[in-house]
Amino acid sequence: MPLIVREATSGDIPQIHQYITDLAKFEKALEEAVLTEEDLKESFFTNSPQVYCLVSELDNVVTGIAIWHLNYSTWLGKHG
């Protein structure tokens, strides 16, 4: 089965949270990663999200995540 990249769903939240905490542990900063699964749901799945997430999936297993946000300059009045 090929690798699939797709938009995250609410069902992916536990795995996304695990990947984030695993990275924090690797970076020796676990105490700084205080986000909850509920925080992720509120960030990704609001009517006007400011944060986005894609997941990669292989054989129905999430194998990676990409999280990003858009940047807006209030001084320039433009994105970027």
Image (cartoon, rainbow, N blue to C red):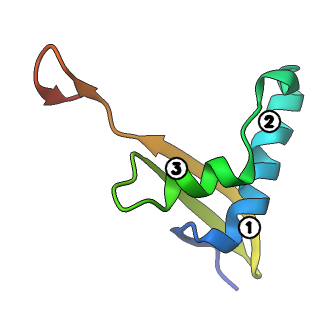
Q: Position of residue 61 (x, y in %)?
A: 78, 73
Q: Is residue 49 above or below residue 5?
A: above
Quadrant (top left, top right, bottom left, bottom right) of the C terminus: top left
Q: Is residue 3 above or below residue 30?
A: below
Mark sitting earlier along the chain (2/3): 2
Residues 32 and 2: in front is 32
The residues tagged by marks 2 and 3 sit, at their Cα atoms, a distance apart of 19 Å
State which quadrant residue 30 falls in. top right
Give the numbered dot on residue 48: none
Residue type (three-letter) at the residue carrying disc 3: Ser
Residue that carries the numbered disc 1 in the rendered image = 62
Residue that carries the numbered disc 2 in the rendered image = 23
The residues tagged by marks 1 and 2 sit, at their Cα atoms, a distance apart of 15 Å
Q: Position of residue 22 (x, y in %)?
A: 85, 40
In the image, is 80 to the left or to the right of 61? Answer: left
For label 2, count other residues whose C-alpha is less than 10 Å away and answer few (under 14), some (14-19) or many (20+).
some
For label 3, count other residues whose C-alpha is less than 10 Å away and answer few (under 14), some (14-19) or many (20+).
some
**What element does badge 1 sit on?**
strand
The residue at 58%/71% (across/down) is 9
Residue that carries the numbered disc 3 in the rendered image = 43
**What element does badge 2 sit on?**
helix
Mark sitting earlier along the chain (3/1): 3
Residues 52 and 2: in front is 52
